[in-house]
Image: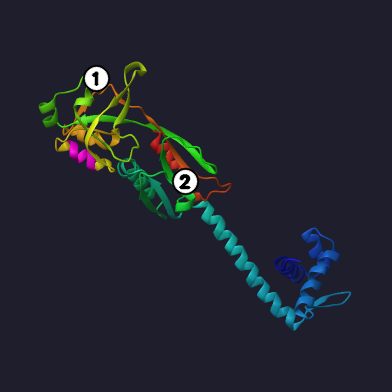
Amino acid sequence: MNKLANMEMFVRVVESGSFAAAAEASRVSATMVAKHINDIEQRLGARLLHRTTRRQQLSDVGRLYYERCKHVLAEVELAEASASELQATPRGQLRVIAPVSFGSHILVPALSDYMARYPEISIELTLDNRRPQLVDGGFELGIHIGDINEQGIVARPLRPYRRILAASASYLDRHGQPGHPEQLSTHDCLGPSYWRRFDQWLFVGPAGTTCQVTVRSRFTANQGNALRIAALNGAGIVLQPEAVLADDLAAGRLIPVLPEWSLSPSPMYLIYAQDARPTAKLRSAIDFLLARLNA
């Protein structure tokens, strides 16, 4: 029999005063109660109880074993309560992976607010433009841009990832403002080097019109902020997410280019491994980020 079950029954016998009372409290037969006690006594090689027809009395071994059993069972109860509390209160370290530009400009502010709401949470964020490897990398949450079809991964849709065009006034003064995406082929364009076809830009415009352009990229980079800084210095027309360029556009440091057109939006997902019983930490992060990033 299970040792903890033996201990629980022994304590119940001692505290209820008889096998019959312990059986009634446990909703088992008195024979089953006796089996639990016999199992302990055989394992220890000692009598725990001296029984007569009218009463039972603990032996010296039984008295010591009873005290130890109460301590062990209390520790088990505390461990289970602690585990339940951990499930109820978000705490611990959350490991997250996200693309560089989205992560630094959009996700970091969201995670900062999440930590403010849950002060017992800490976060380790990895920024990487490669396809996120949750399980192999030891990550609990990830942001994935693009189509996804992986086994064992839950993908919750976020707002599509929209990229827009902008340039500095100095660049546009020298080269002019293009009136159609096709004219980008004569401009210096600043694009991500991690795209497989970084020189092929597919735009969506008014009423869903599409236009694919082969651009000339004299300067590419694997980090969006580097492309943004190049644009601020007049190096060309930059293609970046709205959130990355928002402050520069508002301040007039960059000027919108072809504002009615944007790169064909990419699907974006919050991803995590399937788990029938996620921790409170993971549940709270998922709920918070879905609400924040879809607002």
Which of the 4 image quarters holds residue 202? top left
Q: Secondary structure at mark 2?
A: helix
Whether residues under marks 1 and 2 lie with C-beta atoms below 8 angstroms apart, the answer is no
Q: In this view, which residue lies farthest toward the top?
A: 207
Category of crowding for the residue at label 2, using alpha-carbon neighbours closer than 10 angstroms: few (below 14), some (14–19), many (at least 20): some
Q: Residue tagged by mark 2?
A: 284
Q: Is residue 90 visible?
A: no
Give the magenta-colored segment's residue range.
Answer: 226-231
Q: Residue at x 24, y 42 (%)?
A: 225
Q: Amino acid at mark 2?
A: Ser
Which part of the image, by quadrant, shows the C terminus?
Answer: top left
Q: Nearer the viewer, residue 149 or 43?
A: 149
Which part of the image, by quadrant, shows the N terminus?
Answer: bottom right
Q: Position of residue 27 (x, y in %)?
A: 80, 58
Q: Residue tagged by mark 1?
A: 180
Q: Nearer the viewer, residue 102 or 220?
A: 220
Q: Could you tell me what secondary structure mostly forms the magenta stretch?
A: helix
Task: Classify residue 245 as left or right of residue 174.
Answer: right
Q: Residue at x 40, y 34 (%)?
A: 294
Q: Nearer the viewer, residue 287 or 178?
A: 178
Which of the 4 image quarters holds residue 142? top left
Q: Position of residue 89 (x, y in %)?
A: 49, 52
Name the colour scheme.
rainbow
Task: Classify residue 286 as left or right of residue 161.
Answer: right
Q: Secondary structure at mark 1?
A: loop
Q: In whole angstroms, how far apart are the C-alphas of marks 1 and 2?
A: 45 Å
Task: Classify residue 238 as left or right of residue 275.
Answer: left
Q: Residue at x 53, y 56 (%)?
A: 85
Q: Position of residue 249 (x, y in %)?
A: 21, 32
Q: In this view, which residue lies farthest toward the right?
A: 53
In the rendered image, the vertical position of residue 257 relative to residue 117, given as above or below: above
